[in-house]
Amino acid sequence: MKTISSTIFAMLFISFIIYAQDSTKLKNIQKETITKTVVVKGEKIETKVTETVKIEKQIIKIEDTGVENQNEVFSSEKKESVRVITDDVSANKLNDSLIIELKKAQLREIEESGKQQLKKYEMEKKIIDERDEVKAMKRLEEMKKSGKKKTDN
């Protein structure tokens, strides 16, 4: 049991030493996160939230040869990723209510203009009927006059 545990301990210790040797690479990591929210209003509200992540890694490699003033090797790696967090389309309740109110107002205007046209039609019909009555009365009077003249002969 002691040999197994000491072997595991030795392996862990060696792995930490190997990992520590990675210190010959100096790293500078810059991470920039941009979150955009775009809302488009119209008949429907479209909401899109995106996250853009820009990562720039700068690595300076120095070889461990024991010599002072070694040449450094600079390398830079850039990554950009765009991730859509939410993409939502919903009904525009305010716009829908305004459209309904507008349609109701238009319907009321149509009904009112229909009533006004009906009143105008009735007045014109009444005037025409009165003219026809006046003409009919004149004809009747003329017929009576002409009828009296014939009976007088």
Image: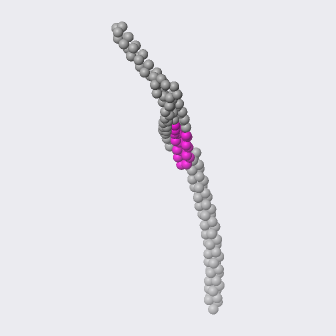
Hey, which residue is sitting farthest bottom in the picture? Answer: 153
**Residue 33 at x, y percent in the picture:** 54, 35
Query: Which sits in the foreground, 21 or 37?
Result: 21
Query: Which sits in the foreground, 63 or 118?
Result: 63
Image point (55%, 37%), residue name: 34
In the picture, the quarter occupied by the N terminus is: top left
Number of numbered discs = 0
| Vertical placement of residue 115 versus 48, above or below | below
Q: Magenta part mainly helix, strand or loop?
A: strand
Q: Can residue 86 be seen in this view?
A: no
In the picture, the quarter occupied by the C terminus is: bottom right
**Residue 114 at x, y percent in the picture:** 59, 61
Give the quarter of the image for residue 127: bottom right
Left or right of 43 on screen, residue 142: right
| Vertical placement of residue 109 versus 59, above or below | below
Colour theme: one colour
Q: Is residue 125 visible?
A: yes
Q: Is residue 51 magenta?
A: yes
Left or right of 58 on screen, residue 145: right
Magenta extent: 35-55
Q: Is residue 74 magenta?
A: no
Image point (61%, 64%), residue name: 117
Image point (62%, 75%), residue name: 132
Query: Which sits in the foreground, 11 or 115?
Result: 11
Query: Which sits in the foreground, 26 or 39?
Result: 26
Image point (53%, 46%), residue name: 44
**Residue 129 at x, y percent in the picture:** 61, 72
